[in-house]
Amino acid sequence: MATTVLVVDDDPNIQRVLTFTLKQEGFEVRLASDGAAAVAAVAETVPDMALVDVSLPDIDGFEVVTQIRAAESGGRRMPIILLSAEGNVSDRVRGLRAGADDDILKPFHPSELIARVRALLARTGQLPTARETEARTLGRLAVFYGAKGGVGTTTIAINTAIALARDHGRLVGLVDANLQFGDHRVFLDLPLDNKSMVNAFAEAELDVDLLRSMLVPHASGIQMLLGPSNPESGDIVVEAHHQNPRVLAHLFGLLRRISDITLVDMSKSIDDFNLHLFDAADVIYVVLTADLSCLKNVQLVLKTMDNLGYPHAKVKMVLNRSSAYTGIRVENAEEVLGRPIDYQIINEYRGAISALNSGSPFMVSKPEGPLGKSVSSFASAVDQDMVASAATRAQT
Ligand SMILES: Nc1ncnc2c1ncn2[C@@H]1O[C@H](COP(=O)(O)OP(=O)(O)OP(=O)(O)O)[C@@H](O)[C@H]1O
Ligand SMILES: [Mg+2]
């Protein structure tokens, strides 16, 4: 049985990040949003351990720990880690006096939290075996390829990733593989100094734990591997890939182990790096708009995919801004391409651009708007594609 961790925190963002991180490690997660709910949850069934935030809307975390300890009997002592906002010594002493076993200061990196959780479980003789903690992920890889610049590939990849995590409870990884001009930092308002693809390619012995320390958690619950912060660093990745093409396959192998679905936002060029990405993918989503130059590019891309011997089911057509007037209707586009458009996403320029410029994706700030709903239903289709792909893989 999986080790159960009770997370006691009223902040939904922290709840999401902790749930994602712990589930990735194979832990089962229970949530309580206030002190009374936490004490009641422990009285009902004692979890294997608890993470308790110090500031809660009703009683504080110290009081929660005191009440839990008071109710314990029979020599059983549940390990508890307090999450506190400041490095205040008297608070730490207070927490330990109340009966906490350890404390961790916010903000913390997910890999630090997991290390502390494991250390405490090991100390109390409850460390689950490696087998137990090997999370069973769906392990799928979906790449998003824009047939032309500016068709909305990044917009779709980011918002779909968020919908998959929120609506489908998936562990989602998002990779910015646009090595020269990756812009996930802009879309999500992140600083330049985060770890990125460059670190992943520089690490000779990349493993799950190291990779995890390079992922940047977003409040929506997704984990991101950012792109290089400038074109020169992008060149370093390309060079590392030329030296050893196996690194990319290894990286995606690790990502499959820690995420149900990894989404990759690709650049437009058809080069060696991108061909490796196409090969690694379970499904390639080709993003297009209904204009002639884009359709011409899609024709060329489809020909390349055919030459590579990919089955039709591996390549899906996503028509973005489908409701915009371009003089070319969906049927016309299908006729030109000689195959059906699989998915459509509506046009809502204001919604898309204001989300971009505010650094908050519309799937977070306006999920109920027309564009949010349109991408949500696309995400549901992606989820089904991923489940189907996993089933096919299991049969072979
Ligand atoms: N469904 C949509 N409706 C209206 N506008 C959209 C839609 N999707 C994307 N856009 C807008 O199109 C522009 C380009 O989007 P985005 O950066 O996601 O495209 P891209 O294909 O990733 O571009 P690049 O080639 O620069 O990587 C942005 O201004 C975005 O707000
Ligand atoms: Mg882009």
Image: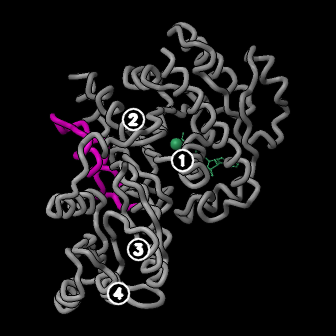
Q: CA distance from mark 3 to mark 1?
A: 33 Å
N-terminal of the pair, mark 1 or mark 2, is: 1
Q: Nearer the viewer, residue 16 or 338?
A: 16
Sooner in the amino-acid sequence: mark 3 or mark 2: 3
Tag 3 near tag 2, CB within 8 Å = no
As measured in the structure, the alpha-carbon distance from the residue carrying label 3 to the one carrying label 4 is 10 Å
Give the residue drawn at x 38%, y 39%.
Answer: 180
- Magenta residues span 189-216
Q: Can you see residue 169?
A: yes
The residue at which mark 4 appears reads as 67
Residue 386 sits in quarter: top right
**Residue picked out by circle 1:** 161
* Mark 4 residue type: Gln
Give x and y (percent) for residue 390: 52, 28
Disc number lying in front (4 or 1): 4
In front: label 3 or label 1: 3
Q: Secondary structure at mark 4?
A: helix
